[in-house]
């Protein structure tokens, strides 16, 4: 489903850890002018991006002491998260009110995700394998790098609910090549994921299993690159994530899952001279899940879903003049499904061609792009975007942009027996964004107003039937701000969202399910020499669990405290108390969230 390159103007990019401390993370988190990202298929500095973008580097990841990708992203501008029972349990990511399978997720520029569900297993992406995260409203790929010489690092941690974690890496960079290997293992006894019962309709997980639901995750990440002369560079990477998850379920759907997520890719960059750069990339991703029902010492097979995605692309960048660039290329994607559940159709491919222009004229900047996707099932669809930015002086910058999107239904949407609709049509969208930002000495702020209108949005009606909701209208405003004040680093992110069903159904005017209207996050950090203290406060307003808006989930707020002591330049001790006020809340009806938890860890990094 190559159309996912432009599902909606939203994307999440993950760059895997290539070394103990990558070059991209050596600056402070606030040195945004030094961070180089790819928000338009080509490298641009963060301050010059015409679309809203946020970068979380490795230094910020380690400082947060997050134990999962969900912990790291919770409360950030424009992001809503749901989770079904704690670490490792099924999690969904909603960006700017859109559905979880409308978010493009790239790992080192490779599109990942299950062809059946249409989204990656966010809960299985190990935070210890992530070097940096880029959150943008458009297609992009991630960058990475590592310092020269031999480097290695290690960490080990323990915590509440039987939490254990170890990770380590070794890397070598020479004058013309580099290689790195990183391994990580995480395990928890978990909590009772679901408070539902087997009796009655709408009783959550329809199971009576008041026990701990454990989780474990083992991952390996191998990466390498070599310079082929002075004008070409070849890079390759492989990620293998193996997880085991216990959940509350039945003999039909199982209560244990063995999951495996694999990403293999290679990329060749060639500076062809005369201001021309060529890039080719090929990759294969695999998402496999085997489900079992375990009871009273026996284990019964329930189902298997094994999807494979092959991708290839070629791109040419032409420098037309100073500050002007033309980019064009093509990419191909082939999805295949192998499952114990029969699907009427188990494969499809997509061929896309694209062109983009970027120009800078003094204080003004312009970006325009167009793309055509030829989808094997749904034919040709053309999308495009236009963005403009202007510097207003005094550190102020105004940006405006508009774009269209297209997303084909997933295999589950179309063909899963009893829970699908083969008559579904692709979703299309139109989005606009207006942004104003200002940057000063030790402070900055950004405000973005946005609206997305989606035609034929796929979702469940009030009778739990999968349908094309005629229309959906999502409006919102995001605020991000940073200030260094009296030795304190303050980061504030706020979101107000109004995601409405705008179709001609009984749910017209209702809020789209599982999207909180208001959310925010405040991070406060202060260093006292070798000692660092931090606080993260998250607040989320109410949301509805269903399209009919009859099941209301209350808002909640949590506070996390953290401490880090640099014992020496190479060694550090970390401690974290999460949800210190033991707030009880749910992001999906009937599914529990962890209460107060503690973790301590030790980290070593070679100098």
Image (cartoon, rainbow, N blue to C red):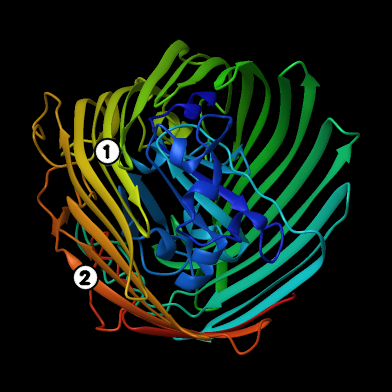
Query: Does 396 appear above or below 544?
Result: above
For the C terminus, give its image quadrant: bottom right
Residue 542 vs residue 194, the one in the foreground? 542
Total residue callouts: 2
Dot 1: what SS? strand
Q: Is residue 578 visible?
A: yes
Q: Assess disc 2: are there few (<14), some (14-19) or many (≥20) residues with their C-alpha within 10 Å of its C-alpha.
A: some
Looking at the image, which is closer to me, 31 or 449? 31
477 to the left or right of 534 = left
Q: Residue furthest top?
A: 380
Q: Position of residue 403 (x, y in %)?
A: 35, 22
Instruction: Of the two numbered discs 2 and 1 on the same chain, state the one appearing first in sequence.
Output: 1
For label 2, the residue is 557
Relative horizontal placement of residue 234, taking residue 500 as reference (left or right): right
* Vertical comparison of 8 with 101: above or below: above
Q: Residue at x 44, y 30 (%)?
A: 415
Q: Secondary structure at mark 2?
A: strand
Pinpoint residue 293: horizontal percent, then vertical percent: 50, 64
Residue 281 position in % (x across, y down): 72, 30
User: In which quadrant of the rendered view does residue 276 lie?
Assistant: top right
Residue 567 lies in quadrant: bottom right
Which numbered mark, 2 or 1, is in the foreground of this view?
A: 1
Local crowd size for mark 1, using a 10 Å CA cut-off: few (<14), some (14–19), many (≥20): some
Residue 250 got which mark? none
Mark seen at residue 436: 1
Foreground residue, 257 or 81?
Answer: 81
Q: Is residue 294 above or below residue 321?
A: below
């Amino acid at each position: 489903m190559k159309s996912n390159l432009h599902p909606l103007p939203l994307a999440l990019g993950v760059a895997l850890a290539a070394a103990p401390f990558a070059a991209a993370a050596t600056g402070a988190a606030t040195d945004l002018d030094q961070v180089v990202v790819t928000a338009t298929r080509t490298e641009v500095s963060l301050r010059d991006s015409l679309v809203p973008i946020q970068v979380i580097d490795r230094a910020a990841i380690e400082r947060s002491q997050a134990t999962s990708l969900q912990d790291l992203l919770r409360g950030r501008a424009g992001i809503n998260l749901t989770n079904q029972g704690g670490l490792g349990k099924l999690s969904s990511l909603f960006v700017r009110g859109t559905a979880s399978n409308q978010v493009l997720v790239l790992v080192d520029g490779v599109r990942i995700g299950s062809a059946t569900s249409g989204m990656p297993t966010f809960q299985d992406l190990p935070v210890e394998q992530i070097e940096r995260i880029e959150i943008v409203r458009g297609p992009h790929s991630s960058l990475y790098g590592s310092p020269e010489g031999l480097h290695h690092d290690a960490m080990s941690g323990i915590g509440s609910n039987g939490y254990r974690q170890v990770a380590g890496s070794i890397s070598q960079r020479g004058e013309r090549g580099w290689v790195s290997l990183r391994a990580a293992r995480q395990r928890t006894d978990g909590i009772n994921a679901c408070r539902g019962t087997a009796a009655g309709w709408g009783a959550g997980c329809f199971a009576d299993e008041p026990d701990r639901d454990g989780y474990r995750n083992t991952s390996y990440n191998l990466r390498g690159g070599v310079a082929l002369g002075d004008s070409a560079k070849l890079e390759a990477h492989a990620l293998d994530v193996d997880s085991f998850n216990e959940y509350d379920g039945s003999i039909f759907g199982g209560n244990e899952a063995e999951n495996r997520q694999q990403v293999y890719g290679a990329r060749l960059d060639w500076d062809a001279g005369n201001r021309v750069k060529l890039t080719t990339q090929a990759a294969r991703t695999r998402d496999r899940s085997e489900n079992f029902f375990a009871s009273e010492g026996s284990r019964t097979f329930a189902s298997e879903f094994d999807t494979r995605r092959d991708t290839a692309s070629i791109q040419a960048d032409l420098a037309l003049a100073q500050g002007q660039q033309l980019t064009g290329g093509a990419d191909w994607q082939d999805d295949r499904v192998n499952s114990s559940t029969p699907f009427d159709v188990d494969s499809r491919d997509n061929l896309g061609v694209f062109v983009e222009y970027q120009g800078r004229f003094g204080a003004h900047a312009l970006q325009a792009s167009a793309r055509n996707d030829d989808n094997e099932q749904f034919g040709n669809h053309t999308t495009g975007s236009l963005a403009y930015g202007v510097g207003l002086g005094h550190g102020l910058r105004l940006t405006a942009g508009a774009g269209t999107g297209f997303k084909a239904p997933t295999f589950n949407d179309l063909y899963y027996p009893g829970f699908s609709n083969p008559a579904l049509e692709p979703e299309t969208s139109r989005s606009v964004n207006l942004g104003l930002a200002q940057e000063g000495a030790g402070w900055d702020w950004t405000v973005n107003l946005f609206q997305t209108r989606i035609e034929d949005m796929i979702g469940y009606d009030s009778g739990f039937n999968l349908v094309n909701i005629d229309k959906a209208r999502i409006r919102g405003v995001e605020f991000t701000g940073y200030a260094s004040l009296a030795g304190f680093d303050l980061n504030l992110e706020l979101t107000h969202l109004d995601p409405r069903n705008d179709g001609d159904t009984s749910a017209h005017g209702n809020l789209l399910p599982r999207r909180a209207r208001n959310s925010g996050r405040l991070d406060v950090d202060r260093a006292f020499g070798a000692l660092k203290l931090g606080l993260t406060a998250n607040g989320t307003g109410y949301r509805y669990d269903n399209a009919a808006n009859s099941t209301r989930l209350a808002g909640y707020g949590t506070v996390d405290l953290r401490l880090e002591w640099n014992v020496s330049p190479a060694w550090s001790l970390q401690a974290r108390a999460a949800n210190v006020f033991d707030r009880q809340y749910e992001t999906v009806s009937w599914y529990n969230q962890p209460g107060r938890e503690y973790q301590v860890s030790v980290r070593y990094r070679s100098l």
